[in-house]
Amino acid sequence: MATAVPVSELPMKVYEAALNTGPDSSCGLATAGFRTAKYLTEEWHQHNYAQYHQAFADRDGSERCRHESQSLAAYAAALAQRTQEDSTAKLGQRLQDTHFWKAELQREIEDLTTETDLLAAQKVRLERALDATEVPYTIATDNLQCRERRQPADLVRDQVETELLKEVELIRNVQELLKRTLMQAVNQILNRDHKQICEMDWSDKVETYNIDDKCGRYNNQSTNIQFHPSSSKFEESASTPETWAKFSHDNIYRAERERLASINLRLLIDNILHDTAEDLRLQCAAVDEAFAKRCEEMEDAKHKLEHHLKKTLKEIGDQENNIAALKQAIKDKEAPLKVAQTRLYDRSFRPNVELCRDPAQFRLISEVEEMTESIESLKQKLLEAEQSLRNLEDTRMSLEKEIAVKSNSIFIDRQKCTAHRTRYPVVLKLAGYQ
């Protein structure tokens, strides 16, 4: 059933027709009440056409909207899928970059750790080598102290003492060098700032890699996704890809430079240990050679002194026999002298003219003079022989003392010093390998 439309809502022409009740109207007053709400047929068709048109326009607009919506939805879906795929690809690329720098940092950290362990081993070698130098230093100082007990005649600054003093000075210099190098190694090992920075960077890379890997696994069917409206922004402290890569590159560069310094220090330590060990062993050989030569010299001197002592003892015996012979010769001259003097004495009692200076008298007087002169000569020679014997005895005592001094010196150099030097460390121990 049609609903009556108010007059005010009718089209203008219909409204005017409804109101056309003037004197020229074809309708009379009798039909006034039936004509107020009526449409003309033309108007009715126009109204229907308007409804058709409106329906068509609405349908057409709705259809366009549907098509546009479908196109927009398809475009939005394709765009969302494309952008999601692109974002996933970008995340994948980022994962590769992060993995690259993470691997580089991990490699550098492992290299630093390995290098630190190698340097620590060199540090142990330095400590062993430094400890090993105490034995040579003790041996050298003990040798010097033992040689102070030589007797004054042999208490000389010989080649052995010169070489021993050089050895002591060399050991002190080596010890100072090893201590300084050891301090450098300790400082290098304790300087772990670059390793810690790389470890922190690596840790951040691992965490970032896990986050990006988690993000890369998200999809539209994931159950743990939700809206985060405030997340679509850039942080003020965020880095750029260039600064991000430069940060890790600089860390690795500094770590490599520190590792190179450690490698150079290890090579330096190795050269120092090799050179110091060789120098100490060469100086030890020089000291041993000086000891050997000195012992040979003292043995030769001792043998010569013993040879002279043997001859001196023989000469003392001969001189004692000579003194005894001189004394006997002097004693043997007493009887002839008594005879000659008695003859002269008795002839002095010849009477008167018989007291003549005859040849017998001259010969007896010359005999007494000759005897007396011979005895005086023998006595003088006896004094000389006795003085020579005393000199020989002094020489014998001096030779025996010198032999004792040489024996003492040989005992000190050979039994004390040289025997003690057999404990001198070998090259491997001085180089810190044992």
Image (cartoon, rainbow, N blue to C red):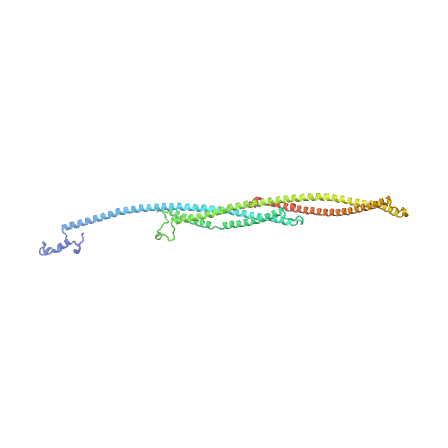
Residue toward you, 127 or 92: 127
The answer to whether 27 appears left or right of 215 in the picture is: left
Residue toward you, 401 or 137: 401
Residue furthest front as drawn? 353
Residue furthest right as drawn? 351
Residue toward you, 396 or 434: 396
Where is residue 216? Give x, y as percent: 38, 46
Where is residue 317? Give x, y as percent: 76, 44
The answer to whether 137 appears left or right of 407 in the picture is: left
Query: Looking at the figure, which quarter contains the C terminus?
Result: top right
> So how many labels did they put on this image?
0
Where is residue 9? Give x, y as percent: 17, 55
Residue depicted at x 65% and y 44% = 297
Whether residue 427 is visible, yes or no, is yes
Residue depicted at x 78% and y 44% = 322
Where is residue 418? Give x, y as percent: 63, 45
Task: Give the vertical position of 30 relative to 432 (above or below).
Answer: below
Whether residue 434 is visible, yes or no, is no
The answer to whether 66 appears left or right of 122 in the picture is: left
Residue furthest left as drawn? 24
The answer to whether 58 appears left or right of 82 in the picture is: left
Residue toward you, 414 or 117: 414
